[in-house]
Amino acid sequence: SETSSSISRQSMLSNTHTLFAVVRPSLVHHQQSTMTLLRLQHLVLTAGLSTLATSTTTNAQTLPGCHPQWRAGGSNVYSGGDIASVDGFNYECRDEPLNKFCGQTAFNPGLNGDMGSWTLVWTLLGECEGVATKAPTLNPSSSPTFSAWSEGGCPDSFVDDVEYEGGELVENNGLAFKCKEFPWSGWCGQDGYEPGVGDAWSDAWDVLGACKGTMTPTTSPTWNLPDFGGCPGLFSAEVSYEEGDKVSLNGVAYQCREYPFSAYCSHESYAPQSINSDAAWIALGTCEGSMAPTGSPIFEVLGGTVGCPDKYDISTEYEAMDRVSLELDEGRGFVYQCKGWPDSGYCNMIPPGDSSGLGWLLLGGCSGSIAPTSSPDFELLLDQEGCPEGYSSSVSYEEGDKVSLPIDDERSIVWECDSYPNSPYCNQYQPNDANGLGWKMVGHCKGSIAPTASPSFETLVELGYGCPEAYSESVEYESGDLVMVEASIDPSRKVVYECKAMPSGAFCNSGIQFSPGSPNSDLGWKLKGFCNGTMTPTASPAGVDAASACAAIPVYSPVGNYDSGDRVRKGDKIYECRGFPFYLWCSNAFYEPQDLPGLWSQVWKQTGTC
């Protein structure tokens, strides 16, 4: 109808508008996903216009049934024209090359509504109900005759309303069938696709041949993996796994991947040997039996902790930093310490020495009973070569901050604020608190901390082109920018630093604690050498007047293709495309340079007038 066509046109205009709304650049978001969206942009422009031209025809029709449920994963590859359903709506995967993204989680059809990134690669076809069926075809004049299946016996019989996966075998009416791989496997368990029955079954199943009786029991699968030895604990969907945790399943040992993939290790849909397994787990090798008990640690390697604390008692409630001992033989034992939060939660669930390594940290060997607490043995602590500022409850501390606590008139202990998630406790508990949260002991010191020495000018190279502008915390720097830091006034010594390439260059704008010459300077800045005087301004080429120089700079175009360092002009103002990763948005008309403040300044900077 005219009304439904109008609604469809409005919906498609909204979707097409979304094609041009690129995610705001941010160093916090994954750069790879952002770069993928930007590379797709010029492809999407054409696809968007084509979609508008056909929107009335496509969206005015409601499909009679829902196609297979959309699924994500490395093996789930969609072709252009493939249709999948999500929450009662059918979506069609766009043609090459956009179809390569149809199976990625970031492009989940319908995610975040009309503003979602899925609109770049999927087309909304409309609402659906029930199960989509294939258009009927002419039945053959006679039933085909199939040769005997090479495997002999029949697999398990086909069962209605069972969700089959690619590669699964079934028997139906004396024939053996194999469920096709994704995405066709989505049809295998749906009504209308019973193997060998009707017209549509061949879209989901391959016929293997005639069969009789039952199959020979399947032998253990052959894995092309190294021998891992004994098997770690069995995988359980009820256990919370972390990076590096090891499990086993069906004679194969697996290890949980590093962050952020480790977040999937506790999800049943990402269990080892599932279709999504590779996203969360690494296959280490085949295993048999249980893992050999860990050998007793060598006392010479662990080092003694003087005396043994109280023995571990399963009835005792333990907290972070509590220490216990496990007896090895008469007079000797091992000392374990309950880890900091959140790992400390395992200390009342898992005993020290467990193969999982959860909760407890092995500190060393011990003999006898624990000696009374005394001042730390300075022979065993690292000399910090001067004491940092003393701890103060009025100061806000962050990860890596160091403080000192005196133990007598001359000596102090140096503590360092632990990494996240323990660092917030540094502003709740003082060092050496009984809770042991937030702070870790790193050494001892005497006197005040020695000032950082200026770079040795004998080992620095004179740059010879004068000094750049002095570093300023209020200036926004990019990769390759040069700054000057005055190391001393008399004699005059000026040092030049260069902002590093991304991602290290992000630290160039992270505050005074990361400024050039600071203790954290190396994270974002590279020492270039020393300088004298000022940099000579770049002169205009001889014989070129201001008007000609301005005319040589191209006028900004909303459809231009710009790269880092490209300059454009609008009116009498000159703009330059910023460095990585911001230059990726310079070709996006949404960030067109303007006279007024706005998002455009994140990707362009004004460099002058002409």
Image (cartoon, rainbow, N blue to C red):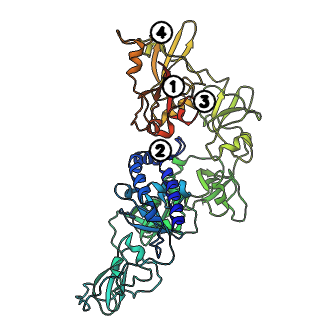
Mark number, residue 606: 1
Amino acid tagged 3: Gly
Pick the residue in front: 210 or 564: 564
Say which element carries label 4: loop
Q: How far apart are the two marked residues, 1 and 2, measured between alpha carbons? A: 25 Å
Residue depicted at 70% across the width and 44% down the height: 425
Pick the residue in front: 507 or 77: 77
- Give the mark nearer the N terminus: 3 vs 2: 2
Mark number, residue 532: 4
Residue 292 seen in this snapshot: no
Residue 596 seen in this snapshot: yes
Mark number, residue 328: none
Amino acid tagged 1: Gln
- The residue carrying mark 3 is 511
Q: How far apart are the two marked residues, 3 and 4, measured between alpha carbons? A: 26 Å
- Give the mark nearer the N terminus: 1 vs 2: 2
Rendered location of residue 169, percent (x, y): 36, 81
Residue contact at pointers 1 and 3, CB within 8 angstroms? no
- Give the mark nearer the N terminus: 4 vs 1: 4
